Amino acid sequence: MKNHLYKAALLAALGLALSPVAKAADLYVGFNDYAGTTVSGADAGNDYVIDLGAFTDFTTTSTLQSSISSSLFTSAFGGDANDLNNVAVGAVAGGATTGGSYLYATVNPGNLSGGKFTAAKNDVSSIPTGVYAAAGSATSPTWDYLVAQSPTVGDQSGNGVYSQFGVSPESSLVSGDVTLTLWGSTLATGLGKTPTAFSELGTLTIDANSTGAGADTITFTGADVTPAPEPTTYGIFAGVGLLGLALRRQFAAKVA
């Protein structure tokens, strides 16, 4: 308890905040800067974790959008001049459903054993949201500690999501942008059950830039969502329709 209070005081002094543990039924996007520099006196590797809402909202037919706080992103990574290109980002979710449990991630780890599935799900359920220094422990977990330190370096616990998957759910931002595929699996209750194969749910398009179209947004697009035609496409359709109408009138006139 003493160590936890000391860390809370340290984070407050650094202008960072450690939020309460996230809800187990939500999907989380986590940014971390394992390759970055020290920020406001804190260890390199500060984390910024966003709660995107209930996992049940992320389906193959849904479209959702969330925002990135520019000020929180800057607080966590502003000391790194290359933050929009070396900050890692990924998404994970884990929790219970009726008759079983679920696991979402922006990686397809292939088939998982029931034990590894459950361990990864439990780790995800312990992730706090907000901005905080990345140094973590079993009693004061962070994204780095429970998920992954980078796209190539595992979780600090040695037994977290990265370790269970055998692959990281993260990718690095490129000019502040990245598109990640979201996958999901379920595990039924009962002895001897195995998780279903991961299936594609959709994509997360992340724009961490603070300027330009789509700035500071996270957009989920379900795998079965049909993209809306571009304005130029509507113009083509209209032109074809008018041409057809003109030809029909000409044909009618000749027949008359």
Image (cartoon, helix red, strand yellow):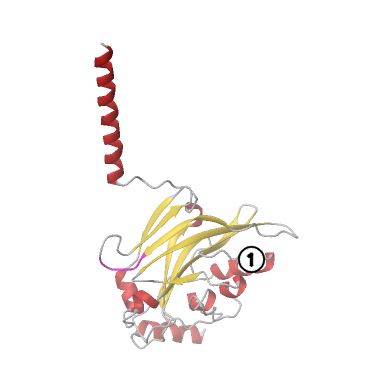
Answer with left or right where residue 102 lies relative to residue 144. Answer: right
In the rendered image, which residue does mark 1 sit on? 117
For residue 83, which quarter of the picture? bottom left
The residue stretch that appears in magenta? 207-211
Does the magenta run of residues contain 176? no
Q: Percent x, y for residue 97?
A: 59, 55
Q: Percent x, y for residue 99?
A: 65, 53
Q: Residue visible at 30% across and 70% down?
A: 70
Q: In this view, does 80 lie above or below 104?
A: below
For residue 76, which quarter of the picture? bottom left
Principal secondary structure, stretch drawn in magenta: loop
**Residue 11 visible here:** yes
Seen from the viewer's position, the closer of residues 250 and 149 is 250
Answer with left or right where residue 133 lies relative to residue 197. Answer: left
- Quadrant of image for the C terminus: top left
Q: Residue furthest top?
A: 256
Q: Percent x, y for residue 226?
A: 42, 46
Q: Percent x, y for residue 140?
A: 51, 79
Seen from the viewer's position, the closer of residues 252 and 10 is 252
Q: Is residue 238 above or below residue 218?
A: above
Q: Residue visible at 53% across and 65% down?
A: 107
Q: Is residue 131 above or below residue 217?
A: below
